Image (cartoon, helix red, strand yellow):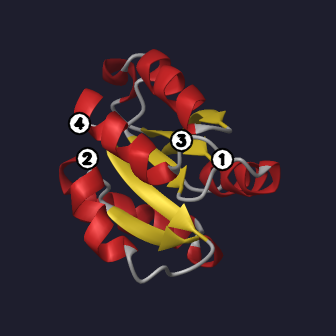
Amino acid sequence: MAPAQRTLTVGVVVVDDQLVFRQVAREVIAATPGFEMLGEAASGEHTLAVVQELHPDLVLLDVRMPGMDGIETAARLTEAHPGVVVVLVSIEEAPYLPGVLGSCGAAELLRKQDFGPAALRRVWKRHRPDRG
């Protein structure tokens, strides 16, 4: 679905090599009014193709994945799709990540254990207030 057709919803792509987190994210997004799950990917490489095809507004991107990790994937995504908000998600608070956020283009780091409807709305409002 093209972005112009989704003016009232935030289209989301979830990227994580762990199926269980993708399932949880799917449920959280479905339970959050104004957000729509467009697709998912299990690797950085697959993410690039999914984002190119689906044109999401927001990408939730796991930091640690085999192959192309979330940092490299975020850098490639934000370079190729500057209008997409990329949020890194991680189970841990790695002390090196704050410095990496700016260099890879990600908007922020969200801990997986804090992820829920309120966090999803807060992240979106913080980084795209023009879109509600």
Disc number placed over residue 66 in the picture, else none: 1
Residue 47 in percent (x, y) is at 53, 32
Mark 2–mark 4 CB contact (< 8 Å): no
Kindly identify which residue carries mark 4: 83
> How many labels sit on residues?
4
Q: Nearer the viewer, residue 45 or 107?
A: 45
Q: Nearer the viewer, mark 1 or mark 2?
A: 1
Q: Is residue 123 left or right of residue 64?
A: left
- Location of mark 2 (residue): 131
Which one is closest to the eye, mark 2 or mark 3? 3
Question: Looking at the image, is mark 2 or mark 3 earlier in the sequence?
Answer: 3
* Left or right, 6 with reference to 126: right
Q: Label 1 amino acid?
A: Pro
Q: Hey, what amino acid is under mark 3?
A: Met
Q: Which numbered disc covers residue 68?
A: 3
Q: Is residue 51 above or below residue 96?
A: above
Furthest residue toward right: 20
What amino acid type is highlighted by mark number 4? Gly
Residue located at (63% from left, 35% from top): 40
Q: Is residue 121 visible?
A: yes
Q: What is the distance, in whole Å, between disc 4 and disc 3 at their CAs?
A: 21 Å
The residues tagged by marks 3 and 1 sit, at their Cα atoms, a distance apart of 6 Å
In the displayed structure, 80 sits above or below 86; it is: above
Sequence-earlier tag: 1 or 2: 1
Judged by depth in the image, the label closer to the viewer, 4 or 3, is 3
